[in-house]
Structure formats: C-alpha cells, structure tokens
C-alpha cells in the first residue's frame, strides 16, 4: 500500500480514536453555568498520533477528532474552534520535538522513553501555558463572556490542564512503546 494512503488511513483512524477517547473517556467539571472543562487523556492520543504519523497528519487527526467531539457535545460546542487550533498546535510541538530528538530512529527502550517523554512534556507544557491564556481571550473576545467569569474559568482550566498534561505525558509514552514498531514503515 502507498505510504500516503497508509498515512491518510491512519489519520482517519486517529480522528475516530481522538473522538472516542474524549467523548467517552472524560470526567466533566462544571465551572460556571454553561461552562465546563474536563479531565481526559485525549491529548495523549494527539501526541501519539503526531509521533506515529508526523506533525501534520497527527495535527489533523487531533484537531478534527477533538473538534468533532466538541461540536457534538452541547457543553463544549462553543469551544470547537479553540480546540481545533490548540490540538493542531500540540501535535506540531510534539511532532517537531520528536523529529528534533530523532524519536523514530531510537532503538533502545531507555532512549525511546527519554525522547518520547521529553517530546510529550514539551507539548503538554505548551498546552498548560497557552491553552488557558488563549481560552481566556477566546472567551472574552469571541464569546463575550464578562472578565470576572472568564478569570474564574481561566483559573479552573489552568489547573485541570496541568493535571491532564502530567497524565497525558505518561500515557502517551506508554502508548508509543506499545505501538511504534508497526508504524516505523511510514518513516522509510
């Protein structure tokens, strides 16, 4: 099978996996009436897809899968545009960091864990810093939420994002260790 067709097929598969993991594997936290955040490991799937498919295809799968999940859940529908941008950016950070660290070339387990862990940490650190700030301005400027409510949402979402980031870093590395061998052919 042609490599581009394989990547496209896996991209569609990861869109579905991202959707399912977020839709059915999250714990919703209501912050204010009409505003929720969630504890989830969907970002681990975004990071994993960027390592296995590359930053572009991984970014597409994370952005589309998680935006679709937002669009189909009334609690998150207004977050879909922000989700699309943030998940794509997370995948770019993870994917380009992995390329810089030559993750796909590593053969020793400890080297794989180190490179994958550092790449996941970079992507999750980016998310922990940028997502709450981006979310604050998105809520203020696009959704027209008052500053006080947006600040409360910012505080809660920053904490949840940090917790998600720590868990997702570990989960992404463990998933990569389990799945990287069959995907190596995409990089040849």
Image: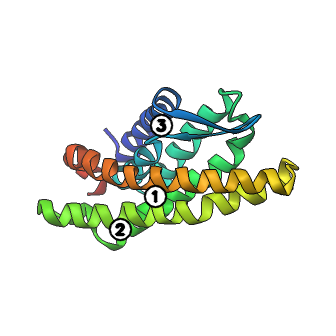
Query: Mark 3 against mark 2, which lies toward the viewer?
Result: 3
Q: Quarter of the image containing the C terminus?
A: bottom left
Q: Mark 2 points at which residue?
A: 99
Q: Where is residue 75 in the image (x, y as percent from the top left)?
A: 69, 31
| 11 relative position to 175: left or right | right
Asked if disc 3 and disc 2 are in contact, CB closer than 8 Å, the reply is no
SS state under label 3: helix
**Residue at image point 24% right, 49% down:** 180
Q: What label sits on residue 55 in the rendered view? A: 1
Question: How dense is the environment of label 1, judged by Cα within 10 Å: few (below 14), some, or many (20 and up)?
Answer: many
Residue 107 appears anywhere in the view: no
Q: What label sits on residue 127 in the rendered view? A: none
| 67 relative position to 122: left or right | right
Asked if disc 1 and disc 2 are in contact, CB closer than 8 Å, the reply is yes
120 and 157: which one is in front?
Answer: 157
**Residue at image point 25% right, 48% down:** 174
SS state under label 2: helix
- Quarter-of-image position of residue 122: bottom left
Q: In this view, does 48 lie above or below 126?
A: above
Alpha carbon separation for disc pair 3 and 2: 22 Å
Q: Is residue 57 above or below residue 12?
A: below
| 56 relative position to 33: left or right | left
Q: What label sits on residue 18 in the rendered view? A: 3
- Quarter-of-image position of residue 11: top left
Q: Quarter of the image containing the N terminus?
A: top left
Q: Where is residue 19 in the image (x, y as percent from the top left)?
A: 51, 32
| 51 relative position to 138: left or right | left
Question: How dense is the environment of label 3, judged by Cα within 10 Å: few (below 14), some, or many (20 and up)?
Answer: many
SS state under label 1: helix
Alpha carbon separation for disc pair 1 and 3: 15 Å
Question: How dense is the environment of label 2, judged by Cα within 10 Å: few (below 14), some, or many (20 and up)?
Answer: some
- The colour scheme applied to this rendered structure is rainbow
């Amino acid at each position: 099978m042609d490599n581009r067709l394989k990547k496209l097929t896996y991209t569609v598969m990861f869109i579905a996996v991202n959707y399912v993991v977020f839709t059915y594997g999250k714990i919703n936290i209501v912050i204010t009436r009409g505003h929720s955040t969630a504890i989830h490991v969907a970002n681990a799937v975004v990071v994993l897809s960027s390592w296995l498919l590359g930053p572009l295809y991984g970014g597409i799968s994370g952005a589309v899968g998680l935006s679709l999940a937002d669009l189909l859940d009334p609690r998150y529908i207004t977050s879909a545009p922000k989700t699309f941008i943030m998940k794509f950016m997370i995948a770019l950070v993870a994917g380009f960091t992995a390329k810089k660290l030559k993750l796909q070339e590593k053969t020793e387990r400890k080297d794989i864990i180190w490179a994958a862990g550092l790449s996941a940490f970079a992507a999750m650190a980016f998310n922990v810093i940028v997502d709450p700030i981006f979310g604050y301005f998105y809520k203020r400027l696009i959704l027209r939420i008052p500053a006080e409510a947006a600040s409360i949402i910012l505080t809660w979402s920053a904490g949840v994002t940090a917790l998600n980031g720590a868990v997702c870093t570990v989960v992404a590395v463990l998933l990569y260790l389990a799945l990287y061998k069959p995907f190596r052919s995409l990089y040849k």
